[in-house]
Amino acid sequence: MSLGSSVTRGPFGAASWIGSIVRRMDWLAASGMLLLMLSGIGMAWINARSYDQELLSLSSIFLRSIIWTLLGLLTFAITTAINWRWIRTFAWPLYAANLLLLIATLIFGQDSGGNSRAIAIFGIAIQSSEIAKILTLVAIATVLTRENAQPDDLNATLLAIVVVAAPFLLVAVQPDAGTAVIILAALFGALLLYGVATRWVAALAALGVLAVPFAWAFLIADYQKERLIAFIDPNADPAGPKYQLTQALDAISSGGLFGIGFDGTGSIAPLPVQESDFVFAALVRSFGAFGGLLIIALLGLIVIRLIWHAWEAEDRFGIVLAGGLAAIFLIQAGVNIGMNLGMAPITGIPLPFVSYGGASLISLAFGLGLVQSHRVHQGGGA
């Protein structure tokens, strides 16, 4: 279980090691990620101009987006190079650190747009709920693939539920219902591709439905209830909780097929939270349905490649990891785009790699890097 022992074997060891990584990488998934990141930087430029920010100031979302993207690419590259077995070895210390960070966020964290809380570490605001998605998935994959565990073993399913329960509740009470749902999606995706009996997955889904009244009473904040009611009620006040949705739909309809373009002067009135929650509406307004469909295609490419990796993986850890990550991307992108189109209630779920936000970008880059590491250090075809 080495980080890459060939580096030390002769003067050409490092070149051989890097060459092996380059040959084995899934360049389709990596290209999809890179193009989405570049789209995110482009939208950050438009949003910074729309907010009348100085592009290269330290407070500019454009400059910060570039920095976060570079850190995300570095995270992806390092994780890909490291043997995935090291991450699995330290799965439980990482899981414990994850829980401690979530607890610290509840105690010391500051409100982050009403949808979640962030904690300052070395002066940088970190949304621990974003990090929790991937670290919880690693723990799920570890517990389901422990020695002697079998897909038809109910104990494996129950242990996975126990692993998910703590981070799910800690994220839900921040309150960040959207990310809590994503954590559940990771569990379902992992269980389905792991091969757990359908009856156990159906029972888990039924349990989730039965828990809705409890969640409504104790986990969902009042403003979140207002959003859900406004989503269901077609006669809800358009100047109330539906205001953001109304503005987003107007922006999307104004984009037409190829968009209204952008002039870089900030003359286009900004949408509510257009740098994160409603970045898709802002993108369609500027680049039209063509731009929106391109983003959807790139996200779909990543999901398909993750499912393909799960299908061809030689061990169960790879199956569970890739399957859970595919569910995270699918549900996160689906909910974000759906709420921009009025097809899902408004939550604080970012659009992968396109919405502004360092924690989401780096955590998803880490997840994709981990799947790439599994492919690189264990093989796999195209």
Image: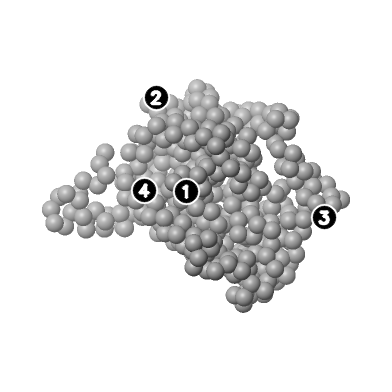
- Indicate the quadrant where residue 285 lies: bottom right
Q: Residue furthest left?
A: 10
Q: Earlier in the sequence, mark 1 or mark 3?
A: 1
Residue farthest to the bottom, as pictured? 263
Q: Earlier in the sequence, mark 4 or mark 2?
A: 4
Q: Measured from the top left, where is residue 58 in percent x and y?
A: 49, 62
Q: Which mark is residue 148?
A: 2
The answer for how far apart the CA atoms under marks 1 and 3 are is: 38 Å
In the displayed structure, would residue 166 be above or below residue 111? Answer: above
Disc with the residue nearer the chain's start (3 vs 4): 4
Question: Which residue is labeled 4 in the image?
Answer: 79
Amino acid at circle 4: Thr
Q: Tag on residue 123?
A: 1
Is disc 4 surrounded by few (<14), some (14 to 19) or many (20+) residues within 10 Å?
many
Q: Which residue is mark 3?
A: 238
Screen quadrant of the N terminus = top left
Q: Identify which residue is drawn at 71% across, 47% down.
A: 345
Left or right: 328 in relation to 4 = right
Q: Residues within 10 Å of mark 3 (few under 14, many from 20)?
A: some
Judge left or right: residue 133 versus residue 18: right
